[in-house]
Every structure is written in structure tokens, then in C-alpha cells.
Amino acid sequence: MKDSTTRPHPLEFEKPILELEGQLAKMREKAESQKIDLSDEIGAAEAKLDETRIRIYENLSPWQRVLIARHVDRPFMLDYLNDTFEDFCELHGDRLVGDDSAMPGGFATISGRRCVVIGHQKGRNTKENLERNFGSAHPEGYRKALRLMKMGEKFGLPIITLIDTPGAFPGIGAEERNIAEAIARNLREMMDLKTPIIAVVLGEGGSGGALGIGVADRVLMLENAYYSVISPEGCAAILWKHRKHAPEAAEAMKVTAPELAEMGLVDEVIAEPHGGAHNDHRVAGDHLKVAVVKQLAILEKLSEEELMEERYQKFRKVGTWLEE
């Protein structure tokens, strides 16, 4: 864990940790500058800090995980391409309308395996967010994604999608260019792609915007990501008529990785560094790499027929119903 001088944008529930880190830093500075022995006091402060960290981070509420998933310093798709993949060669355009910077994609290598990587990219400041449209892709982004997936199938390359979006762009232009049709086509075509597909939810997995590149043989989620048909704020606005009830909505909706894994909707939860992936991009990237490579090794052993049948059965089992 980083100290209070380097902690990136602490969240509200992290303030007790921040205060203790500040007190500990002052104690160490005093001991060094005044040449006095404060080892007992420092040891007690460190023990209290460790206890507070464990109490907070091992008992995160669904809403707190949503806040971590949205953290501005959380690693985004292109960060993972730098830390986890090698030799990324970006490809542009859907060959129909244009390119979409919210959905980068292209060829890459992971642990010596060639693959196609596609995902959502957010920005960290106003300029980047305007360029990336806050990670909300247009129809051409989904059509570009499908073009690259078809290319991966043609060359026998596995497909890895990195999901991090509040949802597909809901603007008038996107509707005019048939965003719903673009996503629906991806859902249908991905079910029939004859090459391994792994989807990883990095942060936000919002609605059809996430599902448009989320039909996969293995669905993985980072520990503090969330995956849902609607945002907690959107749900709260519908059910409670006010966004302030978002924490209650997050609790009721079962949006977190552990909850979704328990229901069988997620195949593996990827551990994050203590406090969230934004605290150590390198460790987060290493964990993602290990998980993806492990799943690729399993999927590559399947024949084409076995791969298609397993994918079909995976989605047939999603959801439960009761008959009277």
C-alpha cells in the first residue's frame, strides 16, 4: 500500500486509513529529525493501520466496490496492453462509417501467444474523455470489434476482450446508426465464432455496452469490478425515484464479482492489489496475465466441436426459473 503522500485520490471510505497514514508519516519524520526513539509508538501505529486496512478492504460493500471500479487512477485497457500484452498493433475502422476511439483493438501477444485484443478505453482528464467518449462506444466501435473478431477467427487466433464501460453511447447519432442492431449482431456472431474467446471485466461492465463484446467461453472479472444490466444510480432512480439510494440498489442487484461468481455467471475472479488495482498497476496486470494465460491453455486443448458445444451449454445454463 502506498503512503499518504502517494495515495491516488482516496475514496470517502478510505479516509480513516489516510488519517492513520498521515499520523504514521509524521511520527517517522519526528523520530528521524529529532533523533529520538519512537519505535514502540511507530510499531503500535503500524499495527493499528494494518488492522484498519484489513477491516475496510476485506469487508467492502457492493457500493464501495463500484466506487473502486470507477476510480480515475484505475488501470484502463491501454494500461493493460502496456503491462500485460506485448507487440500491440492497433487496427482502425469498421469499413462502414469510421473509427471509434472508445473501442481500440488489434493484434497483440501474451506469453508468446498471438491474439486479438479488443476493449473499451476511458480517459483520465477532460481531453482524453472527449476523445474516448468516456468509454461509451458508438455503433462503429462494435462493428469494428466484430470485424477484428472475424479476422481472429480467420487466422485461428484467440480473442480477448477487455470490458470497461458504463454502457454503449445513448446519443441520437448512435441511435440513427443503429446501436442496438450493432450490439445484437455481435451477440449472435460471437456465439458462433470458431476460436477461443475470453472476456475480462476490468472496471465497469454496464448493460449492452459490455455484453456487445462479452459473449465468451470464459468470463473473468477483477475483484473490484462490477457487471450489471443498469448502473446502481439508474436502478435507484427507477425504483426509489432518487439516485441517493444507489448504495441500496448495488446491494440488491448483486453486481460484484464474488456475487456473480457464486451465481455461476463469472468463471473466475482475479485478485487485485490491496485497496484496488489503482494502487499498483503492475501487480494488477500480472494477475490478469496469469488468469488469461491459464484459461487460454485450457481452451486451446478443446477441439472446435467441443469449444462450440461448451460455449452453447454455458449460456444455456445462465439464469434460473420456476415452474408451477
Image (cartoon, grey):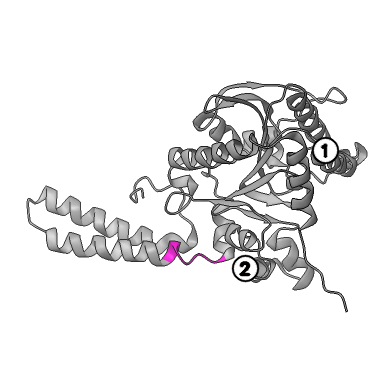
First reached walking from the N terminus: tag 1 or tag 2: 1
Q: Is residue 151 above or below residue 38?
A: above
Residue indicated by mark 1: 192
Residue 41 x/y as whole percent: 16, 63
Choose between 246 and 149: the one closer to the eye.
149
Asked whether the viewer can see residue 157, the reply is yes
Q: Residues within 10 Å of mark 1 (few under 14, many from 20)?
A: few
Q: Main secondary structure of the magenta part?
A: loop
Choose between 239 and 276: the one closer to the eye.
276
Residue indicated by mark 2: 247
Mark 1: secondary structure: loop
Residues drawn in magenta: 56-61
Mark 1 and mark 2 residues within 8 Å of each other at the beta carbon: no
Report the amino acid beneath label 2: Pro
Report the amino acid beneath label 1: Asp
The picture quadrant where one finds residue 38 is bottom left
Give yes or no for residue 236 being in the magenta stretch. Answer: no
Residue 131 x/y as whole percent: 68, 32
The picture quadrant where one finds residue 197 is top right
The picture quadrant where one finds residue 16 is bottom left
Choose between 268 and 300: the one closer to the eye.
300
